[in-house]
Amino acid sequence: MNWVFLALIVVSVLTAAFNGTMPKLTEATVMSAKSAVELALGLIGQMTLWLGLVGVLREAGLLRSLANVLRPVMSRLFPEVPVDHPAMGAMILNLAANVLGLGNAATPFGLKAMQELDKLNTQKGVATNSMALFLAINTSCIALPLTVIGVRATLGSKDPAGIIVPTLLAASFSTFFAVLACKLLERRSIFAMSRYGAVEIDATKLKAPDATALEKAEELAAVAPKTSSWRQVVAVAIGVAVLVALVRDVLAAPASQSAFDTSRAYLSGWLLPLLILTIVTLGFGRGVKVYEAFIGAAKDGFQTVISIIPFLVGVLVAIGMFRASGAMDVLVNVLSPVVTPLGFPPEALPMALIRPLSGSGALGVMSDGLKAYGPDSFVGYLLSVLNGSTETTFYVLALYFGAVQVKALRHTLAACLVADFAGPIGALLVCKAFFASAPYISPK
C-alpha cells in the first residue's frame, strides 16, 4: 500500500502540472480530507448498530453453532487434517467468525489454525496443501458486508442492504474457484512438496497469536446460554407471524412483475428488518439479555470508526487528487477498450485492482466511487459488491504465513490470484442479474 499511495500522489501532481489542473487538484485535496472525516463520522451509527447486533449473535452461541454446521464440509476439504485435531477446530471457528463479519475474532483463530497446521507439516517453511487451501478460502472470504451497508446508508442509498445477497453470491463464486484452483494445482508436479527442501527458519521470529485476543475469541465461541421453552415458543411465534405477513404481502404483489423482480424487491425491502428481527429473537429464544448484549458490544462502534479515519483520509485524499488531476480519466480511457467489450465498467477498475492489496484502500476507493457515481447506480452497486467478493490477499498471506515463517508458498499465491480474478467476474454477473435496471451512473 505504501507504493500505491506514493504512486497515486506522484502521478496526480505530475498529471495536474502538465494538464494545468493544479487549482482543481488543490481543491480536491482539501475537500477529500474533509469528506473522509464526514464519512467516518456518519458511519458511527451504522457501525454501532451492527456491532451491537453481532454481540447478540455471539452471546446466543451462533458462532459455535455455525462451526458445527461447517464441520462436515471442512472434513472433506481438508482430508489431511484429523477431524479431532486442534487445527480443524481453529479453522472452523475462523471461517465461522469471518462469515459473521467478526474480523477481530477471526484473526486469532486463523493464526492459531496456521500454527496447528504447521504441527502436521513435515517440511517446515513449506506450505502444505491444507495451508494453501485455508489461505485461499480466507482470501475469498464469504462474509456479511456490514461495513459496506453502513457506508451506503451514510451516503444516502435508498437500498443500503440490497447488496447482501449479491455479495454473498459473488464471494461464493470466488471461493468456489479458489478451492478448485487449489485442488487442481496441488496435483501439478511443479508444485509437489518433494521439489522443496525444508526451509531454514528462525524459531525466535515466529509470531504467536495474541493470547488475550485468542482467549476472548474462544470464550465468545464457547458461549452456551441457558434456554427456556417459553422463550423459544415466543420466538417461534414471532417468526410465524412475520412469515404470514410476508406471504400475504407477496400474494398481493402486482401480477405484472416477473418472479425474479418480485423476489429482488422483497429481498431489498424485507431483508434488513428481517435480519435484525432474526438476530434479536434468536438471542431472546436462547436466553440472552438482548439489550445488555447489544449495548456491551455496541460500545466499540465509536472507537472502531475513529480508528479507520487515518486510513480513509489517506486513501480518499490520494484518490481525490488522482481524479481531479485527470489521471483517472486517462486510466479509464486506456483500459476502456479492453474491459468495455466484456461488459465491465471502467469506472470500477480501480476497485478491482486495489481490493487484493488493501482493505482500507478498497474502502476508500469504494466510498469515493459511491460519492462520484451514486450508491444506487449500477456502478455503485458493482463497487459495493466488489468490496465483499474477495479479501486483502497479500495481507492475509503475509499475516498467516508469517506466523509460521512459511517461505515456500507453492501454489498458494496462484490459487489466491485465481480467486481475486474470479471475484470481480462473479460480482459483475450478479450485479447484471440483480441491478440491470439501475441507472449506469446516478444523475446529480
Image (cartoon, grey):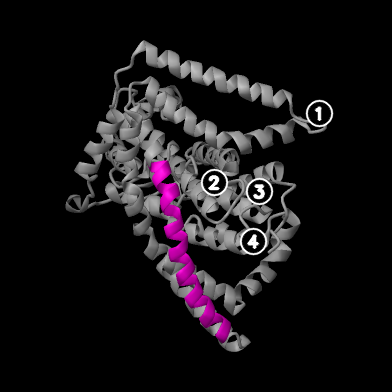
Q: Residue 140 appears at what percent x and percent y?
A: 49, 44
Q: Can see residue 407? A: no
Q: Which residue carries the number 2 mark?
A: 389
**Tag on residue 373?**
4
Kindly identify the amino acid type of the residue bearing the numbered disc 2: Ser
Give me the residue at 61% from left, 64% from top: 372
Q: Position of residue 398 (x, y in %)?
A: 35, 53
Q: Secondary structure at mark 3?
A: helix
Closer-to-camera residue (140/307): 307
Labels 1 and 2: the sequence-earlier one: 1
Looking at the image, which is closer to me, 36 or 231?
231
From this view, report whether residue 58 is shown above or below residue 5. above
Dot 2: element: helix
Identify whether 366 is placed above or below 59: below
Report how far apart the C-alphas of labels 1 and 3 lie in the structure. 29 Å
Residue 236 in the magenta stretch? The answer is no
Q: Which mark is residue 428?
A: 3
Real-space Cα separation, disc 2 to disc 4, in angstroms: 20 Å
| Circle nearer the N terminus (1, 4) | 1
Q: Magenta span covers which residues?
A: 23-51
**Residues packed near mark 3 inside 10 Å, few (<14), some (14 to 19) or many (20 plus):** many
Q: Is residue 110 left or right of residue 368?
A: left
Q: In the rendered structure, which amino acid carries the disc numbered 3?
A: Leu
| Residue at (73% x, 65% y) in the render | 337
Q: Nearer the viewer, mark 1 or mark 2?
A: 1
Q: Which residue is farthest left?
A: 204
- Residue 255: mark: 1
Quarter holding the C terminus is: bottom right
